[in-house]
Amino acid sequence: MENANNQLELDEEKRLEALVDERTLELNRQYALMSLVNDTAAELLESDAGDYFDAMNSGMELLASWVDVDRVCVWRNNRSDDGKLHYTLVCGWVSEGSAKDYVGLDFSYEDILPEWENMLSSGTVVNGPMDCLPESARVFFAQFDIQSVLIVPIFLKNEFWGFVSFDDCNEKRVFPESEVSILRSWGLLVIGAIQRGEIALSLESALEAAKDASRAKSVFLANMSHEMRTPMNAIIGMASIGSSAPDMERMKYCFTRIEDASKHLLGVINDILDMSKIEADKFELSLAEFDFEKMLGRVVNVINFRVDEKRQKFTAHVDSALPKVLIGDDQRLAQVITNLLGNAVKFTPEEGSVSLDARFLNEEDGVCTIKISVTDTGIGVSPEQQSRLFQSFAQAESSTTRKFGGTGLGLKISKSIVEMMGGKIWIESELDKGSTFAFTIRAKRGFKKSLDDEEQIEQAAANIEGLFAGFHILLAEDLEINREIVQALLQPTRLGIDSAENGAVAVRMFLEAPEKYDLIFMDVQMPEMDGYEATNLIRKLDVPKAKTIPILAMTANVFREDIEKCLEAGMNGHVGKPLEFGEVLNELRAYLLR
């Protein structure tokens, strides 16, 4: 009996020793796994932004070898447009000879198992052979030759971020619970490393983009210096030559060159101003009914002389299905077409060809979609150059401005205008084989059958002798040359004009003879008293017409907020500088002949 008891005690001791040994082995394995996780985490933390994926892959390989799996993958959740929750591979390791790789795959939780999202988002771990999974899940996993799987959901700031999966493609088994918690910790470390790496790469990319933008703006500013100084040099030089010209023919030649250079300089300034509006998000369209073919005709007339200079062949086709009248911003649309045609002519050699095509695509609920294409037989644009064309302050290559001129802003401005019109712009081109720039716009169909009234107005504007005889205006302008320009422009209309060199003088002159004046042109920036204050004082005067006399701002401040500031000060409207004769006549006609 005693021997039997001794044997039992020996057996119990052996059993306990075996349990201790087993537990020791388990603890050693856990410790080794934790050490491995710590080592991979340290490697991730010490890696540079560009190397952290390599460090992660190395850590995954070591971890996969330890837990004896064929794939280790980190999946991130994302919500699709249809509202379904998907998971996409962020990074992963696959053993050599593994049946299939997950790279580039994206799956919907719902497509695998209806309750899959709820199960994982509640923190449930999927652990075991395929036999324990529902039929739909087994069918899905079978395509990747999985025998057993461990899926550990990962939460970041209490939100279901995604999960880490460990695939065994060789045997059916359940992963030890003690290892699951360690692998979950590893998943959190990996996500932290992923976020750190993505932030670092994003910052690096942003820094490089900022450097590129800075370089582009430096080149742009250098080009602008050239673009502005060249016409200014022509203006100053020709003014000097013209002032000492021995005959009228030579003087007329100088004036013509001054006019050409001035228009070029104004175009450069307008591009810069438009770009400033775009970058400040203050670029707006002015919608009105317009005759599409007449707008196109004006553009072609502007381009024709350049075409003739280079002896190029120009053709235009307008789809007969296009509505005669559209509602949109015809000036901005003309600006886009002029820019594209101007580029086509500029980059096409002499005796080449340029064509314009305008097509009606469709109409839905009264809104028409129109496609306009400009094709040339010019130098063409490479794919790499095309990627820069529609960026701010950029041209196809830095030498383009030196060789052909231009601000490099036209296509970016055109892109903004086209997108504001509900369309898109693109290029189809090959080097040395020409280019096609095309864009679409969306515009409502107009209601007028014709624009005969507008044609009559334009004809009337052409005959302006004595148009405003008997009317008298007050011009507040501090620069003498600007006063002379207004006087000279309006002289044929027989409009009476008195001038004031600042706002204070304008207020005094109006107060002394309020009944004399029918309208006031008010500059905004003047010494002693600016136009805002002068307008405000006039409106407060207790004299006849002070509240009702039309006051129009005449200023180079042409942004939307500038116009609004003029209206808030009590002005009735706005005329931009440099003055356009047609615009000035239209404003005078609107207020004096109504």
Image (cartoon, rainbow, N blue to C red):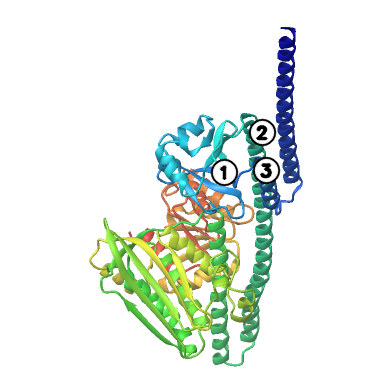
Reading the image, the residue beneath label 3 is 63
For badge 1, the amino acid type reads Asp
Residue 523 seen by the camera: no
Q: Secondary structure at mark 1?
A: strand
Q: Quadrant of the N terminus?
A: top right
Reading the image, the residue beneath label 1 is 168
Q: Secondary structure at mark 3?
A: helix
For badge 2, the amino acid type reads Ile
In the foreground, 309 or 589: 309
Cα distance, mark 3 to mark 1? Answer: 13 Å
- Vertical position of residue 433 compared to residue 68: above or below: below
Percent from the top left, x then y, of residue 523?
54, 58
Cα distance, mark 2 to mark 3? Answer: 11 Å
Query: Outermost residue toward the left?
Result: 449
| Residue 182, numbered circle | 2
Q: Nearest to the eye among marks 2 and 1: give it.
A: 1
Q: Secondary structure at mark 2?
A: helix
Residue 9 seen by the camera: yes
Of the residues under marks 2 and 3, which one precedes in the sequence? 3
In the foreground, 259 or 124: 124
Of the residues under marks 2 and 1, which one precedes in the sequence? 1
Q: What crowding class fits label 3: few (fewer than 14 Cα within 10 Å), some (14-19), or many (20 or more)?
A: many
Q: What crowding class fits label 1: few (fewer than 14 Cα within 10 Å), some (14-19), or many (20 or more)?
A: many
